[in-house]
Image (cartoon, rainbow, N blue to C red):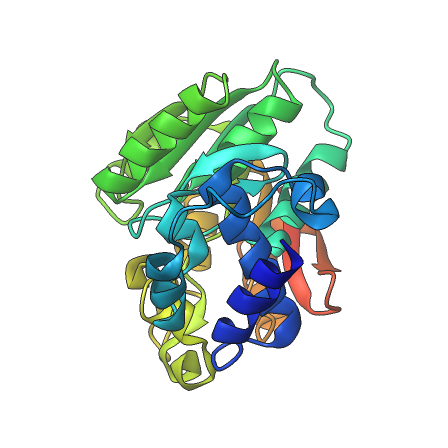
């Protein structure tokens, strides 16, 4: 088994750092064989009946995300289906969920709205952690909503998902919530040159990018709607001060920015007075 791991890793090295290539090799073997990580690493399973893995390796060499190749990912204790219609959940977004879960809210049965829900990861993780909460997820993409509904069923939680455009007329009438959370598009077009091909070529641009001329477009719209008493955003590390000023001007208080595991400003929260 060690030889197989080394063989796959060596094939991936032209496109991936060594640590990432080895992690991908282990993931390929796990998914393709059903062997556990410990079985692979201890070599207690032979390689005689392992299927041909070259197609998967070739797709990775074209920078296709492994999560799309296998159709799912493990994140925040959840097994989530992901497709090219949804972003692949990131560790930073798990930190956003943790920030909300650790916050001391004055009531126990919070009403939560997740705007731009994508795969439903945030909404489902919050519902899983707080079964008493009433959680709703919005997304403009019908395909994303279909994936999110499937993920809720896959993880045995009840979350209401609805296709909705937050820029549409009448969205203000949907009601009010105790918590509004969003990981909206926040990468500026000018940042594309620094992005990896596995993101740029495969993940949905609609969920990633904002115009260089208006990087706070989605934050402004969500904040202006005043749909929630508590607001939580995942943010572009380049604009925490501008976003804090925007929220202050719109009447939010107790504004706080949290850094992610990489030391970058990544989460902002605020409260309606």
Q: Residue at x 37, y 58 (%)?
A: 56
* Residue toward you, 57 or 153: 57
* Residue toward you, 230 or 251: 230
**Residue 209 can be seen in this image:** no
Q: Quadrant of the C terminus?
A: top right
In the rendered image of this protein, does residue 122 appear above or below residue 61?
A: above
In the rendered image of this protein, does residue 1 appear above or below residue 237?
A: above
Residue at far front of view: 48
Q: Residue at x 70, y 33 (%)?
A: 101
How many marks overall? 0
x then y, percent, for residue 187: 44, 70
**Residue 223 can be seen in this image:** yes
x then y, percent, for residue 38: 71, 41
* Residue toward you, 46 or 238: 46
Q: Residue at x 66, y 69 (%)?
A: 19
x then y, percent, for residue 170: 24, 36
Q: Residue at x 32, y 63 (%)?
A: 202
As drawn, is 262 to the left or to the right of 179? Answer: right
């Amino acid at each position: 088994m060690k030889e197989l791991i080394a063989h796959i890793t060596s094939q991936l090295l032209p496109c991936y750092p060594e640590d990432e290539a080895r992690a991908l090799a282990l993931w390929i073997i796990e998914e393709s064989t059903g062997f556990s990580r410990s079985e692979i690493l201890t070599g207690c399973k032979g390689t005689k009946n392992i299927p041909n893995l070259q197609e998967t390796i070739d797709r990775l060499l074209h920078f296709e995300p492994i999560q799309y190749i296998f159709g799912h990912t493990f994140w925040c204790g959840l097994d989530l289906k992901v497709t090219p219609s949804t972003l692949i959940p990131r560790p930073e977004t798990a930190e956003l969920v943790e920030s909300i879960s650790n916050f001391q809210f004055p009531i126990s049965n919070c009403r939560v709205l997740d705007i731009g829900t994508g795969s439903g990861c945030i909404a489902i993780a919050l519902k899983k952690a707080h079964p008493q909460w009433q959680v709703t997820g919005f997304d403009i993409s019908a395909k994303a909503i279909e994936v999110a509904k499937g993920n809720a069923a896959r993880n045995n939680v009840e979350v209401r998902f609805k296709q909705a455009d937050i820029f549409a007329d009448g969205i203000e009438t949907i009601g009010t919530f105790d918590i509004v959370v969003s990981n909206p598009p926040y990468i500026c077009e000018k940042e594309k040159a620094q992005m990896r091909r596995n993101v740029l070529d495969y993940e949905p641009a609609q969920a990633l990018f904002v115009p260089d001329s208006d990087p706070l477009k989605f934050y402004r719209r969500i904040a202006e709607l005043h749909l929630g008493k508590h607001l939580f955003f995942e943010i572009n590390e380049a604009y925490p001060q501008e976003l804090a000023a925007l929220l202050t001007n719109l009447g939010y208080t107790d504004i706080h920015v949290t850094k992610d595991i990489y030391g970058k400003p990544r989460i902002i929260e605020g409260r309606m007075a």
